[in-house]
């Protein structure tokens, strides 16, 4: 250790003050404890993140701790395997540089709460622009190729690329006789004209007011299949909902639909057919005056139940 006296040139009398410059190199080791050892060796040898569970409080601690912080129960033997996926509960972006950083700044330090764990732990998140980082981000652990027998055996967390998620409708088992839902729409001249283009049905009773005046209706009316179509959003998107396969739809037309009429298509579960797990639904189509425009029935195969 070397040292030198440094003279101060300030007005106060500092002739007895001096500073010492030196270097300390201090290799050391310490026992990580039984709990810490098991956590790190499981990471190192099995690429498994483990936590400790308090069976009393139903809490899972990661990093593990041998005593429950809530009830002080000894939980040191209640090891549980945890998935490599979790959610970011908080984060900060490190922009300054200092020794001992795991990566070069700027980088993201985040609190990651693993699925099935109740406490978060700090790690780094890569693979997302800094400006896009947010709490609530779903992430997964990426393990280091080479072990260092430290927490850096998880090299980092990265965002989980999740496809669009869809919520399927009611399954056969979830459906009950009496359940119903509906969809309402006003039929405009544009709808009728577009439907003529879709179907090729340019019949002047839908297109030509002067011709329509000569018919028993006295004015243009919508194609019969147009209000009938409005049951599709009910069956396919509401009841049973997404994933439904329509096997049969029958309708009887009861009254014309005029331009500007507002039609409500309603489907109601009337029968469950257990042998094929099909469902029969009664269909009604009413206008704004509550007049029955059409009625019928549908046979559908509901979506499978969600896992
Ligand atoms: Zn507890």
Image (cartoon, rainbow, N blue to C red):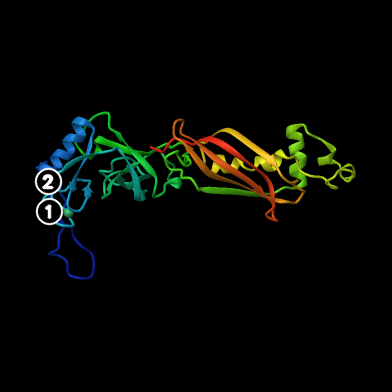
| Ligand 1 lies under 8 Å from the Cβ of mark 2 | no
Comparing 33 with 183, the one in front is: 183
Give the crowd class for mark 2: few <14, some 14-19, many >=20 residues within 10 Å. some
What is the residue that sits farthest to the top in this orientation? 145
Q: How many marks?
A: 2
Mark 2 lies on a secondary structure that is: loop
The quadrant in which the C terminus is found is: top left
Question: Which x, y percent locates residue 181?
Answer: 55, 48
Q: Locate residue 7: give its quadrant.
A: bottom left
Q: CA distance from mark 1 to mark 2?
A: 9 Å
Question: Which label sits on residue 5?
Answer: none
SS at badge 1: loop
Q: Position of residue 145 (x, y in %)?
A: 27, 29
Q: Is residue 42 above or below residue 130?
A: above
Q: Which residue is mark 2?
A: 76
Residue pictured at 48% horizontal, 41% vertical:
169
The quadrant of the picture showing ligand 1 is bottom left
Could you tell me which residue is drawn at 74 percent across and 46 percent down?
A: 255
Q: Nearer the viewer, residue 128 or 104?
A: 128
In front here: 78 or 223? 223
Q: Residues within 10 Å of mark 1 (few under 14, many from 20)?
A: some
Side of 261 relative to 123 (left or right): right
Residue under numbered circle 1: 73
Residue 26 seen in render? no
**Left or right, residue 120 beside residue 293:** left
Residue 71 drawn above or below residue 194: below
Instruction: Tell which residue pokes out farthest to the bottom in this image.
Output: 12
The response on whether ligand 1 sits within 8 Å of label 1 is yes
Whether residue 43 is visible here, answered yes or no, is yes
- Left or right: 210, with 33 as reference point: right
Could you tell me residue 152's position as x and y percent?
25, 38
Instruction: Residue at 29% x, 37% y: name it.
Output: 84
């Amino acid at each position: 250790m070397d040292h030198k006296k440094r003279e101060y040139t300030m007005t106060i009398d500092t002739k007895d003050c001096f500073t010492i410059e030196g270097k300390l190199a201090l290799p050391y080791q310490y026992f990580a404890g039984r709990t810490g050892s098991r956590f790190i060796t499981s990471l190192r040898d099995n690429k498994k993140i483990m936590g400790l569970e308090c069976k009393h409080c139903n809490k899972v601690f990661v990093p593990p701790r041998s005593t429950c912080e809530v009830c002080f129960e000894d939980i040191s033997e209640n090891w549980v395997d945890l998935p490599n996926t979790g959610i970011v509960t908080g984060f900060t972006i490190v922009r300054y540089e200092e020794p001992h950083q795991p990566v070069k700044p700027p980088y993201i330090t985040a609190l990651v709460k693993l699925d099935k764990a109740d406490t978060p732990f700090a790690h780094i998140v890569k693979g997302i622009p800094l400006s896009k980082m947010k709490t609530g981000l779903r992430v997964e652990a990426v393990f280091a190729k080479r072990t260092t027998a430290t927490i850096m055996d998880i090299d980092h967390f990265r965002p989980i690329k999740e496809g669009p998620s869809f919520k399927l409708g009611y399954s056969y088992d979830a459906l009950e006789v009496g359940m119903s839902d509906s969809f309402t729409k006003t039929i405009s001249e544009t709808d009728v004209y577009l439907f003529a283009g879709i179907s090729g049905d340019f019949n002047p009773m839908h297109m030509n007011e002067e011709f329509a005046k000569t018919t028993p209706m006295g004015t243009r009316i919508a194609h019969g299949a147009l209000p009938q179509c409005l049951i599709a959003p009910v069956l396919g998107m509401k009841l049973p909902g997404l994933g439904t396969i329509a096997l049969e739809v029958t309708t009887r037309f009861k009254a014309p639909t005029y331009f500007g009429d507002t039609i409500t298509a309603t489907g109601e579960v009337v029968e469950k057919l257990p042998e094929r797990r099909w469902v029969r639904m009664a269909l009604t189509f009413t206008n704004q005056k509550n007049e029955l425009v059409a009625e019928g029935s549908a046979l559908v195969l509901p979506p499978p139940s969600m896992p």
